Amino acid sequence: MSSRVSDWPARARAGSRTPQQAGIGRTFDATYEKTLGVAREAAIEAGLKVESATEVDPNTYLIMCKASTSAWSWGEIVRVAVIKASDTQTTVRIYSKRKSAVNIAAKGDYSNTILSNIELKLKSQ
């Protein structure tokens, strides 16, 4: 168990090096600032713990999250990339990876949950 916990930073860095085009994405009719503001909340509401949030450049922000371990799963690493597409549109891409390849009980994909949460939050603003 301790090796998986101490392995988190290396695995998180590997997720942040994954191409931004990886994962499932959706473009929202909302400004970059507005979308970025709700993306973190959407990940937390999906049951994830935010480990880090980094501005890659003025048009891209990466939010690194993880799902907790449980009796059935070693957890997952989830990257939320918020990318400015234009002044009025923002793309959010979700990349999920199991902490262990043999972790068959892991949920594996948080994309639809996070993207739906973002959509609902944007509509309510």
Image (cartoon, rainbow, N blue to C red):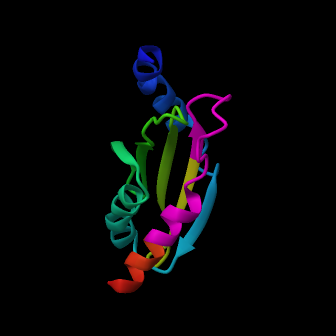
Instruction: Tell me the quarter of the picture where residue 34 sits.
Output: bottom left
Above or below — where is 39 with respect to 71?
Answer: below
Judged from this view, the residue extending furthest toward the top is 3
Instruction: Tell me the quarter of the picture where residue 104 sits.
Output: top right
Q: Is residue 91 visible?
A: no
Residue at 40% from the left image edge and 49% from the top image edge: 48
Judged from this view, the residue extending furthest toward the bottom is 124
Q: Whole-percent x and y of residue 68?
A: 42, 39
Q: Whole-percent x and y of residue 62?
A: 43, 48
Q: Quadrant of the N terminus?
A: top left
Looking at this view, is 13 or 33 the one in front?
13
Residue at 41% from the left image edge and 53% from the top image edge: 47
Above or below — where is 3 with respect to 98?
Answer: above
Q: Quadrant of the C terminus?
A: bottom left
Q: Is residue 2 magenta?
A: no
Instruction: Tell me the quarter of the picture where residue 120 sits.
Output: bottom left
Q: Whole-percent x and y of residue 81?
A: 49, 53
Q: For the image shown, how many numbered marks are present on the structure?
A: 0
Q: Whole-percent x and y of residue 74?
A: 52, 31
Above or below — where is 25 with respect to 106?
Answer: below
Q: In the image, is 36 to the left or to the right of 83?
A: left
Residue at 40% from the left image edge and 75% from the top image edge: 31
Judged from this view, the residue extending furthest toward the front is 71
Q: Is residue 104 visible?
A: yes
Q: Which residues are magenta?
A: 96-117
Looking at this view, is 2 or 123 the one in front?
2
Looking at this view, is 79 or 42 the one in front?
42
Above or below — where is 100 with respect to 15?
Answer: above
Q: Is residue 111 magenta?
A: yes
Q: In the image, is 100 to the left or to the right of 119?
A: right
